[in-house]
Image (cartoon, rainbow, N blue to C red):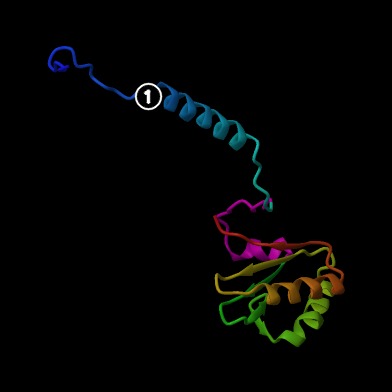
Amino acid sequence: MRRKYGSQEEETAIDLTPMLDVVFIMLIFFIVTASFVKESGLDVIRPQNNDQNEDDDEENKNILVTIDQTQTISIDRLRVDRGSVLPRLKQLLADRPEAAVVVSSSEGANIETYTLIHEAALQAGVASVVMATEK
């Protein structure tokens, strides 16, 4: 028996329909699950940027505390050491009892220095401690 090859040979092809069904089901699954995922985070309310001069900063009556990359602390543009933060804040609060403490830190500052300032402000009796952020 001899087989004849030629026009009787059928072309073989892979049916892609089941694979496409699986891909679409996976796509729907990822879209549905991604819409229910809520990222946890900290809501930061940034102060509005005002183009005002230095005289308005004195009328603001907030106490500005800055931390630089070397963990140097400055309170109202006066450099203080770590042990003098609480007495300096108490002194400034005597003049401005309703003042809030605004902490502005540079990129290299660490959280320990911020925590020291935050705890000292709470011990001094500050009503509000705010971390300043940039846009």
In this view, the residue in front, 11 or 21, is: 11
Question: Residue 112 falls in which quadrant of the image?
Answer: bottom right
- Residue at 43%, 27% (x, y): give it: 19
Q: Which residues are magenta?
A: 43-62
In this view, the residue in front, 50 or 135, is: 135
Is 133 placed above or below 11 here?
Answer: below
User: In the image, is residue 89 part of the stretch drawn in magenta?
Assistant: no
Q: Position of residue 123 (x, y in %)?
A: 86, 74
- Residue at 75%, 77% (x, y): give it: 116
Residue assigned mark 1: 16
Q: Quadrant of the C terminus?
A: bottom right
What secondary structure prevails in the magenta region?
loop
Say whether residue 101 is left or right of residue 20.
right
Q: Quadrant of the N terminus?
A: top left
Q: Position of residue 117 (x, y in %)?
A: 74, 74
Q: Position of residue 30 (x, y in %)?
A: 55, 35
Hey, what amino acid is under mark 1? Leu
In this view, the residue in front, 119 or 61, is: 119
